[in-house]
Image (cartoon, grey):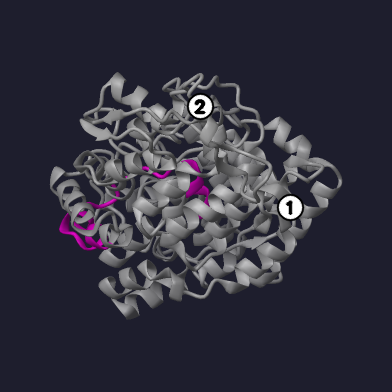
Amino acid sequence: MATMTRRRMMESGLAALVSSMSAGAGAGLAQGMNPARLRERSGTPPTPRVLRQPGKPGFEIGHIPMPAGFIDNAALKLNLPPAPEIVQLLNRISYGFLQEELDAAEAMGYAAWVEYQLNYEDIDASELEDILNEFLPTLTMSNAELFELEDFGQAYIELKAATLFRQIFSPRQLFERMVEFWGDHFNIYHQDDVTQILKTSDDRDVIRPNALGSFRDMLFASASSAAMVYYLDNFSNTVFGPQENYGRELMELHTLGVDGPYTEEDVIEVARAFTGWTLTDETDDLFTFYAPFHDFEEKVVLGQVIPAGGGIEDGEFVLDLLADHESTANYLAKKLCIRFVADDPPQSIIDKIAQEYLDTGGDIREMMRTLLLSGEFRNNDALKFKRPTDYLMSVIRTLNPNLTDAYFRLIFDFLITLGHLPFQWPTPDGYPDDAVYWTSTNALLNRWNFAIGAADGGLDYFIQVRIFELMDGARRPIEIVDTLAERILHRDLAADDRAVLLEYASDGGSPNQWLPLAEAVRKARGVVALLLSSRYFQNR
C-alpha cells in the first residue's frame, strides 16, 4: 500500500467533502442530523445501531474472536499498571499521538512539553490552517456574509469538518482540547435555525482566541456573540417583555454553577440587565445594543446595586461581577479537573485550580499549567473514559493509517452513531463528561466494531492500517503482542492481560513459535483490534 503524506490526506479528504457539498449533500446531511431528543437532557445517550451482536463467553465480531474478559466493561476495569508519566500526559492533553510526538516529548521532558503545548501560538499550524481556509471558505466569513449563502448547510458542514480535521492533524493538541472544552461549556446547538451559520463566528471569534486566554474576555465575547444571543433567546429580551433564558444559563452554566449562590430574583435582575442586547442586520457581526429595548431602572444582582440610568454597562457590570466571583472559580476549576483528571477528581486539585483562577483573574493558561504540573494530575492514571470523539481521533492518530478520499464520511457516520458530532448537543449544558453516559452496551459494541473494522481491513475503503509497519517484522506470537502493545499503548500490560493476548496469538501453542506470514498478519490484526478495544486504550 502506498504511503500518503499527511498533506495529501488532508487535501483529498477536504476535496471529497467539497465535491459532495457541491452535489447538494451539504443541506441534506445537515437536515439528516436532527437529533431525536427534545431540548432536555434525558440522562441516557441515543441508542446507536447495533452492528453485530456478541455472544458469551468469548465472541466473534467480524472475523476476529474476542477472548472473554479482555474487553468487557472497559470503562470500569482500572487499576492498570502505571503508564510512563510522559505517555499519560500525551494521552490526556492530545487526541492520541504519533511515535514522533512521543519521541519529541521524551526528549523535551514533561514540564517542557507542557510549556510547549501551553504556548500554542509558537507551534506552527499554518499548513493545516491554510488548507482549511482554501477548501472551507465559510470559516473566514462574517455573519453578514454567511447570511448571503444559498445553502446554510455549507457553513454547518464546513465548521464541523474544520473542527474534526484540527483534532486529527493539528500539532496544537492541547489547544484543540481546550477549544472542545470551552465549546461544551458555552454550548450552542448547531441546528437551532440560524445557529447553523452563526456558530462559525462564535467558534472563530469567541472560543478559539480565548481557549487558553482570559475567561473574562471569553465571557464578554460570548455575551455579545450573535450565535449565543440567538440560541438563548436574548434577542427577544426587552423591557417590554423580559426573556430570562440567557440570564439563567449565564449564572447556572457559564459562571456560578447550578448550585451557585443566586436566587430566582437574581435571574430576573440579570435578565433586566441584558435587555437590549440583541441582533441587527446593520453590522457585520449582527450584534447590537438597542437602547429603546433596555430597562434603565435600578437593578440588584447578588446584593450589588446597579444604579438606574445605565445602558450596555448594566450587562457588563454583571459579567464582571460573575467573572470575579469565588463560585465561578470553584465551578470552572471542578469542570477542568473532571475533563482532564477524573470524573470524581480530588478536592485538593480543584482547590488549587480555583485559587489560581482568583490569583490571576481567570487566566486559563495559568490554571492549566497548575493542573498539568500538579501531583494529583501526574499520579492519577487512566481514570477518564474517552468520549466517542476522543476515542475515534486517538485510533486514527495512534495507528497513523492511510486515509482514503472517503474517510471523512466514516468519521461523520461514527460520531453520528455514537451521538458525539461537534456542536450537536441540543441543550445549553453541553455534552456529558462522565463515563456512565457513554458506556451503554451498544455504545461499547460500536467502538469494538470500529476497532475491528479498522484492524482487519473491513474499513479499508476509508482507512487503511499499515499493518506491516506496526508489526515491524514480528513473526512470533510473543513478538507480535509485545511489539503492538508498545506501538499502540506505549505501556506495560498486566500479566493476566498479556497472557490472554499470548493465548490468542499462539492459539494455545508456544508463544515463541514462528508463524507463516499470512498467519502472523492475521493474528497481528486481531491483536490490534483487541488493544484498541481494551481498557488500556479506552481510558486516558
What secondary structure characterizes most of the magenta part? helix
Quadrant containing the N terminus is bottom right
Q: Nearer the viewer, residue 467 or 304?
A: 304
Residue at the spot 42% in from the left edge and 48% down from the top edge? 220
Q: Nearer the viewer, residue 221 or 60?
A: 221
Q: Nearer the viewer, residue 387 or 131?
A: 131
Which is more N-terminal, label 2 or label 1?
Answer: 2
Q: Is residue 377 magenta?
A: yes
Q: Is residue 266 magenta?
A: no
Q: Nearer the viewer, residue 214 or 76?
A: 214
**Residue 78 place in picture, x, y as percent:** 27, 43
Q: Which residues are magenta?
A: 369-393
Q: Quadrant of residue 513?
A: bottom left
- What is the three-letter code of the residue carrying label 2? Asn
Instruction: Return the residue at label 1.
Output: 406
**Residue 157 place in picture, x, y as percent:** 69, 45
The extreme front residue here reads 309
* Closer to the eye: label 1 or 2: 2
Instruction: Return the residue at label 2.
Output: 237
